[in-house]
């Protein structure tokens, strides 16, 4: 019985951690090329 209660507590704490992690997620801060070059420049780069 004690093992079952311990397992349940562990499972509930993991679920709570995942829910809080998802709730605090605010997106990615990428530092790539997206939005920094014109579509024509990207097309020429991909064509080369």
Image (tube, helix red, strand yellow):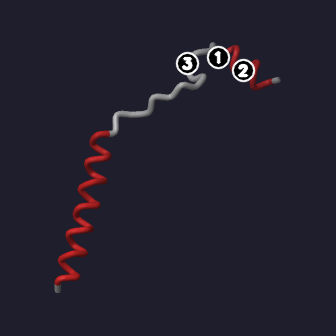
Q: Secondary structure at mark 1?
A: helix
Identity of the residue drawn at 50% across and 28% down: 30
* Foreground: disc 3 or disc 1: 3
- Relative to 28, does residue 36 appear above or below in the rendering? above
Q: In this view of the protein, which residue sits in the foreground, 47 or 14?
A: 14
Identity of the residue drawn at 55% across and 18% down: 35
Which label number is shown at residue 35? 3
Q: Residue lying farthest right?
A: 48
- Relative to 21, does residue 15 appear above or below in the rendering? below
Circles 2 and 1 in contact, beta carbons < 8 Å: yes
- Relative to 36, does residue 30 appear above or below in the rendering? below
Q: Indicate the quadrant containing the C terminus: top left, top right, bottom left or bottom right.
A: top right
Q: Secondary structure at mark 2?
A: helix
Q: How far is disc 3 from disc 2 in space, using C-alphas? A: 14 Å
Residue 3 in percent (x, y) is at 22, 82
Which residue, given by chain and number where applicable, does mark 2 sit on? 43
Residue 17 in percent (x, y) is at 27, 54
Identity of the residue drawn at 57% across and 23% down: 34
- Residue 15 horizontal side relative to residue 46, left or right: left
- Relative to 13, does residue 39 appear above or below in the rendering? above
Q: In this view of the protein, which residue sits in the foreground, 6 or 41?
A: 6
Q: In this view of the protein, which residue sits in the foreground, 7 or 28?
A: 7
- Please state the total of marks drawn on the protein image: 3
Q: Residue 38: which quarter of the image?
A: top right
Which residue, given by chain and number where applicable, does mark 1 sit on? 39
Q: How far is disc 2 from disc 1 in space, using C-alphas? A: 6 Å
């Amino acid at each position: 019985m004690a093992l079952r209660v311990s397992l349940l507590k562990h499972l509930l704490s993991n679920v709570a951690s995942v829910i809080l992690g998802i709730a605090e997620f605010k997106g990615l801060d990428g530092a790539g090329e997206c939005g920094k070059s014109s579509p024509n420049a990207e097309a020429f780069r991909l064509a080369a």
